Image: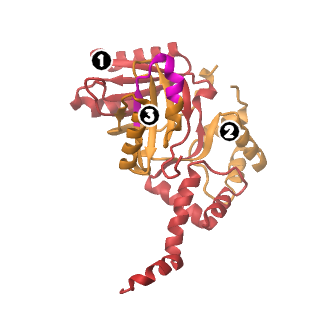
């Protein structure tokens, strides 16, 4: 998807440090030479276009509750079905197909470790597939707010 | 303070601190869906949570300072923008080298995430994960080759797991129950 210069500037400047003040979009508008209304309209459109998943905080996983990367090896013919079941489980927020014997990878979150384990146990029973459970031991770099390489994009 | 037990429910209801704790939990829940796109988003959040606008702003700033909020801003869906190739590269690294290699990987510009996770033998021998978000498969594999050559990683067993479909992608819901 091609974005115009103002959209790109919004993304380049505000993947972090969104102002915390009464009129944050007004302050962003002043910085970028737009109007408050333009900023809000652009953000709404970018969300509709699925360029942004949201505007807002990214919580630190290790401090926000329990979370875990998990994987299952689903039979190739049943992948969509298994993926849909995983999506319906409480606390699942990412679910990707990957090229490997373990072909479905998802992140599950919960308020605490016990709830997380219970949710995984229940999902494991539903799916009748063993779930590979991979909690984070140490994060060396866990920020997806990297600078977009506009030139390299199609 | 000897407060009779029978008085406690009443005190709880009248205690502004307790009301505010409930409001803060509701604020966490609201924030997991993102900031409202209204001219005064913190006021909108205040109306939804029963807090005041300054309380909402204070809480968010405090959570940023404490590190509970890692960043506040636009959360991009890279796939929509054209980052079509997303490779999870997993390595079976000797335990005593995980720390040093993790830090090395994290400093490579095109590595977007890097963390250590436990092995699950015999099914899963890999203990160090890094993610490369790239424009296409060939380019990502080229970047990986560069990394292996420059860091001298030829002897470390690894696997590349490209993702070919996103079934679900949204922010973590820790407090709200969905």
Tell me if residue A38 can be seen. yes
- Asked if the magenta segment contains residue A81, the reply would be yes
Q: Which residues are magenta?
A: A69-83
Q: How far apart in space, not on screen, are marks 1 and 3 (Cα)? A: 34 Å
Q: Residues within 10 Å of mark 3 (few under 14, many from 20)?
A: few
Q: Residue at x 41, y 39 (%)?
A: A122
- The nearer-to-camera label among 1 and 3 is 3
Q: Report the residue marked by disc 2.
A: A47
Q: Which of the numbered marks, if any, corresponds to residue A126?
A: 3
Respond whether the residues carrying marks 2 and 3 are from the same subunit. Answer: yes
Report x, y in % for residue A49. Answer: 70, 33
- Asked if the magenta segment contains residue B62, the reply would be no
Q: How far apart in space, not on screen, are marks 2 and 3 (Cα)? A: 33 Å
Respond whether the residues carrying marks 2 and 1 are from the same subunit. Answer: no
Tell me if residue B107 can be seen. no
Q: Residue at x 49, y 72 (%)?
A: B18
- The nearer-to-camera label among 2 and 3 is 3
Q: Quadrant of the C terminus of chain A?
A: top right
């Amino acid at each position: 998807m091609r974005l115009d210069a103002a959209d790109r500037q919004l993304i380049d400047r505000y993947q972090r440090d969104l102002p915390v003040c009464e009129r944050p979009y007004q302050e962003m508008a002043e910085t970028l030479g737009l109007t408050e209304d333009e900023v809000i309209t652009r953000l709404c459109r970018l969300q509709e276009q699925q360029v942004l998943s949201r505007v807002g905080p990214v919580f630190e996983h290790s401090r926000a509750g329990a979370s875990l990367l998990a994987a299952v090896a689903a039979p190739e013919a049943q992948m969509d079905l298994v993926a849909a079941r995983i999506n319906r489980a409480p606390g699942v927020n990412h679910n990707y197909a990957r090229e490997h014997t373990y072909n479905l990878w998802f992140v599950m979150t919960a308020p605490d470790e016990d709830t997380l384990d219970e949710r995984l146990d229940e999902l494991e029973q539903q799916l009748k597939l063993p779930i590979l459970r991979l909690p984070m031991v140490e994060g060396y770099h866990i920020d997806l707010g990297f600078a977009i390489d506009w030139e390299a994009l199609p | 303070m000897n407060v009779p037990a029978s008085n406690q429910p009443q005190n709880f209801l009248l205690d502004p601190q307790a009301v505010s704790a409930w409001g803060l939990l509701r604020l966490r829940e609201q924030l997991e869906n993102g900031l409202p796109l209204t001219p005064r988003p913190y006021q909108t959040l205040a109306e939804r949570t029963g807090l005041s606008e300054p309380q909402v702003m204070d809480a968010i700033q405090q959570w940023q300072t404490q590190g509970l909020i890692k960043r506040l801003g636009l959360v991009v869906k890279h796939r929509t923008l054209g980052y079509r190739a997303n490779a999870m590269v997993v390595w079976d690294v000797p335990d005593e080298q995980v720390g040093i290699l993790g830090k090395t990987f994290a400093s490579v510009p095109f590595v977007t995430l890097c963390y250590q996770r436990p092995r699950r033998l015999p099914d899963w021998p890999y203990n160090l994960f890094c993610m490369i978000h790239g424009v296409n498969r060939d380019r990502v594999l080229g970047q990986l080759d560069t990394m292996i050559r420059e860091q001298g990683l030829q002897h470390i067993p690894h696997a590349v797991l490209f993702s070919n479909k996103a079934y679900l992608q949204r922010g973590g819901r820790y407090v709200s129950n969905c």
